[in-house]
Amino acid sequence: MNRNKISLVLLVLLVAVSAWLLLSRRSGTYARSAVEFAVTDTNLIRSVEILGRRGKVMLVKHEHTWRVNGSLPVRKDRMSGMLVLLSRLEVISPVSRSRSGEVSRQLQNEGKQVIITLDKAKSREYLVFHDTTETNATYMMLKDANTPFRMGVRGYKRRDLASLYETDERYWRDNLLLHYLPEQIQYISLQYKREPAWTFHLARNEAGEFEMSTGMVPGDWFEPEPARLNQYLGYFYGIRFDAYADLGQDAPLEYEYSDDPDFVLEVGNSTGIRTSLSLFPVFTVDPAGIKKMNLNVLYARIDDWDGMVVLKYLEIDPLLKDPGYFQGK
């Protein structure tokens, strides 16, 4: 009897110890993985590299400014969102044994590779993938590991975290189009392709004051009305475009005049920096097959870029004045 009691007690103790070890191991895995995925102090991050099947981007911090793939500035709201994401990553649960192999293969074959470089050459590296067919969940797996985890972000309701690790450079580029203070502007030229007589030029003279001329080829120069001029110069600060145009899907339709832009706007400052915008109208076709101009947006080609951006008329319209505006007419 006593021997049976002793055996029973030992069995209970053995089960309790095994359960404690199993729970300890699991909780340790949770804690270790949460730390290795998340970066609680984002000030330590020096770069974020994201590689996927559609491309790759390198986000690098230069002092207090983030840049993408070299010298292009990053949109502040996009980078801020990325840093919040990286700091709030949480492990929801390890993937069940029955699905672990399948999810691991999906991560390796379809996932995006994320490399986060921190101070003192430390780094975090993992794969991220969102399952849209079965679980609608985002999974991550550390480099050289074989245990995938289901992930979440505190305070974020969307379940697709992988889409936030965007590999398209255009997603990260700053959408700032024109950012000139009035005192920085050295010259402005606005060509009206359909109405060449409305073309005008503004340029500073040797005394630093603006003079104006009209026509495709500048003729006589005269002084513009000061109040109108100062108001106009203030419009060149903080102009943003709406999005990058996907010319493969929504290319501008042919229109009846020519393939030339309606306007070409050029502005330069005293240090030699210049921006040239070629502005194209956008046409839509109604259900009856009638082509109509879209009065809400137009396309802009910036300098010598191959692509175009979508620009709201509301943003650019104040810059499209005619010469009479500067003469108080």
Image (cartoon, helix red, strand yellow):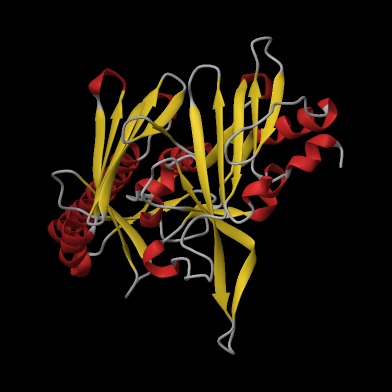
Residue 238 placement: quadrant: top right
Q: In this view, which residue lies farthest toward the top?
A: 207
Relative height, residue 235 to residue 156 (above, below): above
- From the viewer's perspective, tell me whether residue 86 is left or right of residue 264: left
* Residue positioned 62% across, 24% down in the render: 185
Residue reaching furthest bottom?
Answer: 288
How many marks are shown on the rendered structure? 0
**Picture layout, residue 54 above or below residue 73:** below
Place of residue 217 in the rendered image (x, y in percent of width and height, measured from the top left): 57, 37
Give whichever of 286, 290 is nearer the camera. Answer: 290
Counting from the top left corner in percent of width and height, residue 312 is at 62, 54
Comparing 253 with 80, the one in front is 253
- Residue lying at 64% horizontally and 11% vertically, measured from the top left: 206
Is 174 on the left or on the right of 117, as rendered?
Answer: right
Residue drawn at (63%, 40%) of the image: 215
* Vertical arrangement, residue 242 with respect to residue 270, above or below: below
Q: In the orientation shown, which residue stands out farthest toward the right?
A: 328
Q: Where's the C terminus, which quadrant?
A: top right
Q: Quadrant of the N terminus?
A: bottom left
Q: Horizontally, is 62 left or right of 253 in the view?
A: left
Residue 20 visible, this angle: no
Question: Residue 109's quadrant in the figure?
Answer: bottom left
Q: Position of residue 322 (x, y in %)?
A: 73, 45
- Which residue is more in the foreground, 74 or 9? 74
Can residue 87 be spotted in the picture? yes
Q: Is residue 132 above or below residue 271?
A: below
Can you give x and y, in whole percent of width and height, for residue 14 in the image? 18, 52
- The residue shown at (80%, 41%) is 325
Considering depth in this image, is 102 or 51 the residue closer to the camera?
A: 51
